[in-house]
Image (spheres, rainbow, N blue to C red):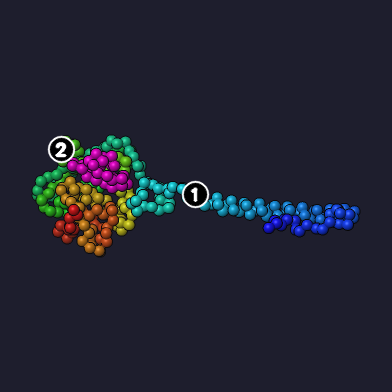
Amino acid sequence: MTPSSPYGPPRPPGPSGRSANRAGDGRPALLRMRRRRRRSVLLGVLLLAVAAAVTVTRGGEPPAEAPAVTHGRMGHGGGGAHPAPSSYPSVGAGRFTAADGETAVHGEDGPLRRYRVAVERGAGQDADAFAATVDEVLADPRSWIASGELRVQRVADAGAADFTIYLATPVTSEQMCAEGGLTTERYTSCRLPGQVIINLARWQEAVPDYGAPLETYRKYVINHEVGHEFGEEHEACPGPGEPAPVMQQQTYGLEGCVANAWPYLDGRRYAGDIVP
């Protein structure tokens, strides 16, 4: 197939054997040349416009291999397209400041478990303020002292403490938990013998879809990890709509249960089946 000319079909030759656009005094030929040039220019502009449009369209498409932007929450339900900036550092100094002073003894009877509270330097958190929250939770009549077989007291001296409750940045908490063979992916808190390690990220953000205020999650995570220190094991959700046992891994999801921060409800130990 013969390609068509952008200037239209060729004209037949004139009587002299030359092209008809050369006949006469040249002015009609000149007009025709100008018309052809205008058509040529217009066609060229049109082609350039089409090419530019195609380029812009292609340029607006993200490359297939472009990685998604994440903020350390991949795989844990935080995958929004535009996550809010974190209000806490991901790593601190790796050294801790202990809260001053001590509390009264709380609980009716049983062995006394003394604890110490420490906050990582560079975490942007006040050790005494964190300790006050911990003290309030562990002294609450819905907490572990409700059994009547356990007493608690915060002390400042490391030598007098049975265990320490740490508030650590995600990187530091991961390193501390890994020393005991636990994998937290900088996301969860953990407990090792004598060490309750609270992840600063969870302390500041809780978890997606928790369905309760941040203060509730904070009370839960203290009671959960301290519960491990007291010998408690993981428990399952009893059923949809029921309160989640405090020893349920609520950080990973409620499984149909409702958020709950306390091991004792209505004066009785509230628990689910032990998770093997």
Q: Nearer the viewer, mark 2 or mark 1?
A: 1
Say whether marks 2 and 1 touch (CB < 8 Å): no
Residue 248 drawn at (x, y percent): 22, 55
Give the side of residue 79 with respect to residue 148, left or right: right
Give above or below for 174 relative to 141: above
Residue 84 placement, left or right of 254: right
Q: For the point 16% across and 35% down, which residue is it?
A: 159
- Residue drawn 18% across and 51% down? 233
Q: Give the residue displayed 20% in from the left and 38% down from the top.
A: 156
The amino acid on which the numbered mark 2 sits, given as a three-letter code, is Ala
Q: Position of residue 120 (x, y in %)?
A: 29, 39
Q: Is residue 132 left or right of residue 48?
A: left
Residue 62, image x and y in percent?
Answer: 50, 50
Residue 104 position (above or below residue 7):
above
In the picture, the disc for residue 160 is 2
Q: Is residue 29 visible?
A: no
Magenta stretch in the rendered image? 173-201
Count how many numbered circles sit on residues in the image. Answer: 2
Q: Is residue 179 magenta?
A: yes
* Residue at 25% over, 60% down: 257
Residue reaching furthest to the right? 25
Within the magenta stretch, is there residue 48? no
Q: Measured from the top left, where is residue 88 in percent x and y?
A: 35, 44
Res. 63 mark: 1
The numbered mark, 2 or 1, whose residue comes first in the sequence reads 1
Residue lying at the far front of the rendered structure: 1
Amino acid at the residue labelled 1: Pro
For residue 112, side relative to residue 165 (left or right) = left
Element type where label 1 sits in the image: loop
